[in-house]
Amino acid sequence: MKRTPIAAGNWKLNKNSNEAKSFFAELIKSRPQSQNCEIIIAPVAISIESSVEAVQGSGIKIAGQNCYHKNSGAFTGELSPSLLKAAGCTHCLTGHSERRSYFKETDKDLSLKNKAVIEEGLTAIFCIGETLEEREAKQVEQVLERQLTYGLEGVDFTATQLIIAYEPVWAIGTGRVASPTDAQSAHAFIRTVLTRLYGESTAQSLRILYGGSVSPDNIADLISQPEIDGALVGGASLKPELFLPIISAIEASHA
Ligand code: PEP
């Protein structure tokens, strides 16, 4: 099954509107020609509209980093899937480990969020991954299976409406990347769980991204693994000179 690869960037709490515009001007000017890789960037909410404007006509897609599971009401400070869509987003991250740990998002919260995002017509980029303690306790598979089973409970989707990002928590922002073999085996396990839950055809079509200290130096080895369909990149997505070689390596691997 041929799956179009993805280079996704998560800017976290970085870049105002002007900085976002400069980034996109540089990225669009220098990006690879072949364009057989989807590029998705998740700016901070307040920079979404200027980002959408800046990427017009380039094919680059814009994602929310988070949203609430309701579209309106008395939820001060929240952002809804419908507002993201109206602003021009096509995707939304869900379940990032920073949301799970700092903002106490649970598997149940995430199933509501995934459902709301997908029902609005956005694609959810659903992040899962184990902590270091869980890895050391040999609970990786148990954790991934739980996060998938409960985080997607009651969520109806087609293969284009969901992307899974495997992000081992100990690799995020630490410079400690998973080995290509460990990442490959986690991805293969995730696809096995997805096959059991949703059937062979859906599982084979879903893209599974690796995230956690991806850099221009390690992307080629990661993307050469058959179950790795792209990357979700934090720190290295903030600078065009780092993100561009990552895009190029992903493109080259699927040329
Ligand atoms: C992330 O924030 O999703 C991430 C993977 O960050 P970094 O690439 O900086 O480890």
Image: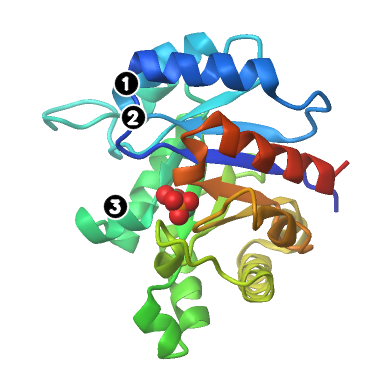
Mark 1, mark 3: which one is toward the viewer? 1
At label 3, counting other C-alpha atoms closer than 10 Å, the crowd grade (few under 14, some 14-19, many 20 or more) is some
First in sequence, mark 1 or 2: give its number.
Answer: 1
Mark 2, mark 3: which one is toward the viewer? 2
Taking depth in this image into account, of 45 and 181 the one nearest to the observer is 181
First in sequence, mark 1 or 3: give its number.
Answer: 1
Q: Which residue is mark 2?
A: 44
Does residue 225 appear left or right of residue 214 in this picture? right
Do callouts 1 and 2 mark residues in contact (Cβ within 8 Å)?
yes
Q: Amino acid at mark 2?
A: Val
Q: Which residue is mark 1?
A: 16
- The circle on residue 119 is none
Q: Amino acid at mark 1?
A: Asn
Taking depth in this image into account, of 248 and 124 the one nearest to the observer is 248
Does residue 164 appear left or right of residue 229 in this picture? left
Residue 16 in percent (x, y) is at 32, 21
At 40% from the left and 62% from the top, the residue drawn is 174
- Residue 203 sits in which quadrant? bottom right
| Residue 93 in sight here | yes
Q: Amino acid at mark 3?
A: Arg
Residue 104 in percent (x, y) is at 21, 58
At label 2, counting other C-alpha atoms closer than 10 Å, the crowd grade (few under 14, some 14-19, many 20 or more) is many
